[in-house]
Amino acid sequence: MSGASTPTGVAVGTPDHGPADAAVALTPTVRSSVRRRRIWIGFAALLVLGAIVIFVVQGAVSGGGPRLGADNPGPTGAKALVQVLADHGVTVTDARSYDAALEGAHEGATVVLYDEYGLLGDDRLARLAMFAQRLVVVEPGFGALEVIAPGVRLAGAATGPLDDVACDVPTAQRAGSLSDGQRLLTVDDDALDAGWVGCFRDADFGHAVVFGETDGGSEIALVAAATPFENGRIAEHGNAALAIGLAGASDDLVWYLPGPGDADAEAAPTLGDLTPGWVSPMLVLAIIVVIAAGVWQGRRFGPLVAENLPVHIPARETSEGRARLYARNTARTHALDQLRIGAIQRIASVLRLPRTAHVDEVSAAAAAATGREAGAVHRLLADDAPTGDRDLVRLAADLTTLEDQVRATLAPATSHPEAGDDSAGRRP
Amino acid sequence: MAPTGRFALVLALGVVPVVVAGLAGVPEAWLALVGWLFLVIGAAAIDLSLAASPRRVALTRELPDRVRLGEPVTSVLTVQNLGSRTLRATVRDAWEPSAGVVGSNRTALTIPPAERRRLVLELLPQRRGDRRTSQVTIRSAGPLRLWSRQATLAAPGRVRVLPPFHSRAHLPSRLTRLRELDGRTPLLIRGQGTEFDSIREYVRGDDVRSIDWRATARHADPEVPGSMRLMVRTWRPERDRRIVIVADTSRTAAARIADEPRLDTAYEASLLLAALATHAGDRVDFLATDRRLRGRVHGATGPELLARMVDTMAGIDAELVEADWAIVPGQVRRVTSRHALVVLLTAADSPGSARGLLSVLPQLTARHTVVVASVADPALIDASRARGDLDEVYRAAAAERGLNDAERVGAAIRRLGALTVAAAPHELPPALADRYLELKASGKL
């Protein structure tokens, strides 16, 4: 706190120009707020640290990986199959690029191809099929079928476990049955003529596995679903037998899952190719600007101020509530009686009758004043019970009319109704 | 800490380098983005470190102590920069919303080191009572105004907003009436409620019945020896009567009738009556009560009376409790043991809520003249006349019931020996004043 001396020539209005004390700050400084919340901060840091440790440990242990990955031990991986084959002397190459797969194929290995995202272009697929001695295509896409096995088409999912082998391929015969969760392929007549054989028939819907040969003489097996190879399902029914039979047919196995690098160079340009280079950085910049603007606008200018409001109740509410109560209970007679009491009192005061006057006197006087029939006036003021809503409205209107008539007949005499009592204070 | 709009704008200007670099290639565009972010955030960090501390500030307030509702208040806050850097501040003086700050309460101030600046706000309070501010928030920007530091400082302030006393418009006409009663207009007729004022010489026009023969006999005319001067007695209304105004602040006073809470109407009526009575030479005491004594003005006269009354009234609002009328006779007795005019400002419109009042009225009417003044709801009368359709008929019936209830309560009060005044909110103060003048004229005080 510096003892500030007030310089001259400054527009100040306060008479005390001496050094002033700094106002007490209500906002805690960063340091003090950190100190006050250090337990919580420590707790949060511990949680974050723990989460990181768990994540790292889990990652190191389980690894994870893509679907049907050769080193993926998860339920959808294929580590079980690869491990078993490796233990039985099959040399397994985990090919992650097209070139590696092609190299393995050249050397006479069995190639298992699982192209989950349809990355491989038609030409590359055709070349792979041509060079590979044995090619197992797991979950072939529409494009892959067109290239490798024209005439074989996708036909949806199987209805349950399949135990009708329906062909004499030894691998399929050994398997005998397949678990639930298969997909189906159909083989049309042209394909049948070309030597394609479907196995594991699901009624007339199609086959789960299709065997055949290409023109180049390489053996092709099309397995419509990845299920028989998955760690989680391989032990069911004859899945294991089929998978081992297909993948372990030769001493060398190339396990090929195409990666993003294997997409055809001459494939259709992606969105990234079509947009200029500055679009993505600008989107990032826009997000940052929006966040900055949000913080700018959202930062509160000091705490909110509470206002202690007094209680105010609209006085009409009592009357409104009572009216709704009458309406809900259709208390027509009661409502009309209220109107009658008011009307009788006002008519009595207009006709200068005592406040305690009986309704018979008032109705007789009103009838006399207006010249209406005495019985009708009495019925209106006392006897008639409303039979319906329309009747109630009519009687209420009649009461008003009667009141107005009584007032009108006495108009000259009562032109100043309040002249009687309210001019007090004038008499000395 | 808070970024400014300028910071967001400067960040957005990064579009230019990003696009220019993007024409050269994708990596260049990313590089330009990262470079721009570093540049701007670095500038912001430097800016923030150069901003003056918003905590090293001294605050002094200049505020009027009291103001009548509806009149503007000028609030002056002097901000003195105690730090060594220029303070570029936006200042918010955190008044309550009902203090009615005119315009924005964000003020930009630039204060060089060790200097001070005045922050002038105009307030137009919207409610009576104490309107407070407890803190001042200062946002101090750096020289580039990219980021700012913010702190909230304690700087309590208070303005007491007094009831408006709109009914003072009725005061001049009532004072004229009072003067007619009072000795200032010759009043030669002796009657109830008057007391002997003086003996003076007869002038033409005086009532011959007021000639005091004994006084005439004592006054020989020095100019015409042997003859007498005719003397008359003059009379004036009684003075030094006591008036005790009791305002009911219980739940019934919270009702808003014709856009004015009952309590505010009661205050208006009390103020007009007090102003009138203090001119007439009577002594006025004011009590505000529900279950306990909420406010009391005792022993004040003249201008001080009104000042103290509005000051007491300012802070009292209706509470949602049932009034305890049993304490009222005791409170009145504590104020005066003599006969007084006791004015009860309350709601006498439903037999249920008036039961407490009716039970203590006999105690009060036994010693004092009691006037029960209550607000009548003009909306009820309107509703009772509209009978167009079924809904309106039911509403009219309910309104008639309400009017009838009020009439019954009024009759009960009158039977117990008290007087009643009931009028619409804006008519109640003059009606009560008229009733007072009437009582004064008839000597019932």
Image (cartoon, coloured by chain):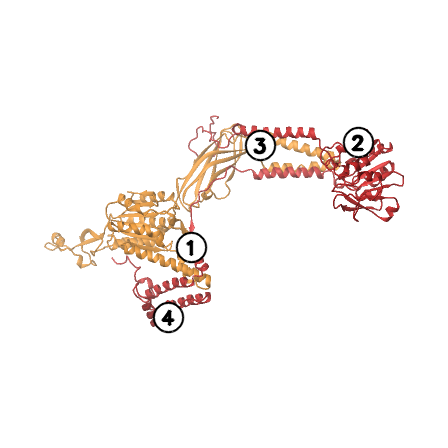
Chain colours: A red, B orange
Q: Which residue is mark 2?
A: A85
Residues at marks 1 and 3, common chain? no
Mark 4 residue element: helix
**Please, what is the three-letter code of the amino acid marked with disc 2?**
Leu
Tell me the subunit letter for badge 2: A
Where residue B224 appears, x then y in whole percent?
A: 12, 54
Evaluate if marks 3 and 2 touch, with contact meaning CB atoms under 8 Å apart: no
How far apart marks 1 and 3 lie (CA) works out to: 59 Å
Where residue B6 appears, x then y in whole percent?
A: 60, 37
Q: Residue furthest right?
A: A216
Please tell me the numbered disc located at residue B143: 3
Q: Marks 1 and 2: which is nearer the front? A: 2
**Please, what is the three-letter code of the amino acid marked with disc 3?**
Pro
Q: Which residue is mark 1?
A: A316
How far apart marks 4 and 3 lie (CA) works out to: 90 Å
Please tell me the numbered disc located at residue B425: none
Q: Marks 4 and 2: which is nearer the front? A: 2
Q: Residues within 10 Å of mark 3 (few under 14, many from 20)?
A: some
Say left or right for B87 vs A170. Answer: left
Mark 4 or mark 2: whose residue is earlier in sequence: 2
Q: Which residue is mark 4?
A: A377
Tell me the subunit letter for badge 1: A
Q: Marks 3 and 2: which is nearer the front? A: 2
